Image (cartoon, rainbow, N blue to C red):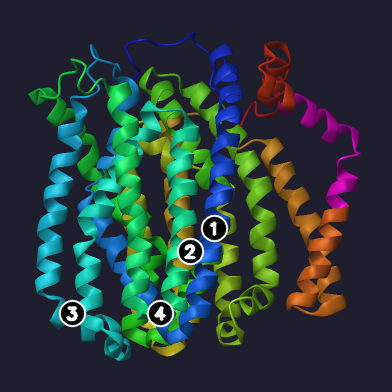
Amino acid sequence: MTAGTHPAVESGPDEPSVDATTAARRSVRTGLAGLAGAAANGLLGFLLVVVITRGYGTVGSGTFFTAVGIVTVTAAVCTLGAETGLIWMLPRRRLGGRGDAARVLPVALLPPLAAAVVVGLVGVVAAGALGPRLLGAGADVGGTPLIAASFAAVPLVVAMTLLLAVVRCVRPIRAYVGVQSVLVPVARPVLVGVAAVAGGGVLLGLTGWLVPAALAVGVCLALVTGPLGVGRGAALRPERADWSAFWRFALPRAASAAIDASAVWVGVLLTSVLAGQADAGVFGAVGRYILAGQLAMQGLRVAVSPQLSRLLGRGERAAAAAVHRHLTSWALVLSWPVYLLLAVFGLGFLELFGPEFTVGATAMTVLALAMLVNTGVGNVQSLLLMGGRSGLHLTATVTGLLVTVSLGLWLIPVYGVTGAAVAWAAGIATENLVAFGCARAVLGQPLLDTTLLRAAAGVVVGVGVASLAGVLAGGRGIPGLVVALSVLAVGCVGVVTVPDVRRFVRVTMSQLRGDVEVASAAAGATSTSSKGR
């Protein structure tokens, strides 16, 4: 990686500098805000899925999830990677009326919005032909209008995605959280629930899902004009160098961004076409739990991606690696208990959606185990992207997608939702391991340390004991899950009494308060533990 023009104080590959300590402390503070938003988003997203599955059943929810998948995948393709380009470029520009950040807006927004309008119009015209192919038996619940509405909404979703990326860079994290993690997810279950209760069908429910996106676009526009200096003298006319610099980074990201954003929806669409709407509905419900387990990763990624861009832009690789290791440990501690419980008690979790969804229990176990790999390596994709290595990120995501699709075409027709889960799990593991290897080679810094390994071992042992107690007492359904959660809660209270754990909590709280001396001591301990790795 090429060093920036303003390098930090040199530090060895295993010795975080003062900049690394400061960056890690700042990452904790912003990370907590991101985590709070992700938690709210996940809880409300789960509520939305409950509304959909309870309101429409397996076939109706499969049709609903397929329509959402069309919007999500198509919008992700049309975005052309520009949302990540904004997060990469804006932190490196000057804000305000005399700054050059506003010049990025036409560069980043116009091509994706033009692509979205063209693709949306083509999709609306072709809706009659696409409906029976994508929805199959679900086409009799308004297939053509549903497909047309899905494609017509693509420009709206693209605009929301891009403007949220701008908000993420030019406003405090709480502004982004307020729109992306509160406004949109609060409105969606309410509006979809009203549609379901009114008996308006899937089309009206999809409309309820889309309306909050329009609200978000309006709020984002109001939030970004001030910091960018729009209307206060900021130049909006880009230079030729702006176009080349932005799209040289963003275009290789376009395909990987589409794959990342579509994630579970590729599986839903494949399952819908190859196995039917009922299996697609079950897979969508399973996918909601799997994505909910990523709350910690998503919240931390949202908070620190601009920070990683600044650090790597200045060539401070040791500081960026220190931030990565620090946040990976937190993500693992927060995420692995969720996935281990999902793996063991998938039956109990799916019973909350209704008895017809419990056929996805095996799929839940397979995907939960694969996500241990995802969270275990941390946000290596962000390291690649914020370091300007979107080509390497594309290599990892395309490799994972090829594995997912090829296995899906083979397994889904025979094994249905379980086959879809195996295909996606293999793709998840492949993508993350390839990305980890690339990030480690590019940074030349250790991305794992003994602190993370000890945390992983402790989580596996603790959750394993609680899960065993739950299975023995109540099986793998809801009763066993309740027992396991109770044992785990008691164990967590007991762990807090351990001196080392209490010391770690005190250090973390000191970091949150900005205590430099304590934070420096903590960073020094981390440096020692990771030497030679």
Image quarter where the C terminus lies is top right
Q: Is residue 32 magenta?
A: no
Which secondary structure, mark 3? helix
**Residue under circle 3?**
130
x then y, percent, for residue 124: 14, 70
Asked if residue 229 lies left or right of residue 38, the reply is left
- Specify the amino acid type for callout 1: Leu
Q: Are marks 1 and 2 in contact (CB under 8 Å)?
A: yes
Q: Which mark is residue 62?
A: 4
**Region in magenta:** 491-508
**Residue under circle 1?**
44
Q: Are marks 3 and 4 in contact (CB under 8 Å)?
A: no
Q: Is residue 502 magenta?
A: yes
**Residue under circle 2?**
189
Between 463 and 14, the one lying in front of the other is 463
Q: Earlier in the sequence, mark 1 or mark 2?
A: 1
Query: Which residue is rendered at x = 90% and y = 33% of the image?
Result: 499
Q: Earlier in the sequence, mark 2 or mark 3?
A: 3
Asked if residue 469 lies left or right of residue 65, the reply is right
Between 340 and 358, the one lying in front of the other is 358
Query: Which residue is rendered at x = 58% and y = 57% of the image?
Result: 43
- Mark 4 neighbour class, 10 Å CA radius: few under 14, some 14 to 19, many 20 or more: many
Q: Looking at the image, is mark 3 or mark 1 nearer the viewer?
A: 1
Q: Looking at the image, is mark 1 or mark 4 nearer the viewer?
A: 1
Q: Find the distance from the CA under tag 1 to the CA under tag 2.
A: 7 Å
Q: Looking at the image, is mark 2 or mark 3 nearer the viewer?
A: 2
Vertical placement of 167 versus 470: above or below? above
Q: Find the distance from the CA under tag 3 to the CA under tag 1.
A: 31 Å
Q: Earlier in the sequence, mark 3 or mark 1?
A: 1
Picture quadrant where residue 166 is located: top left
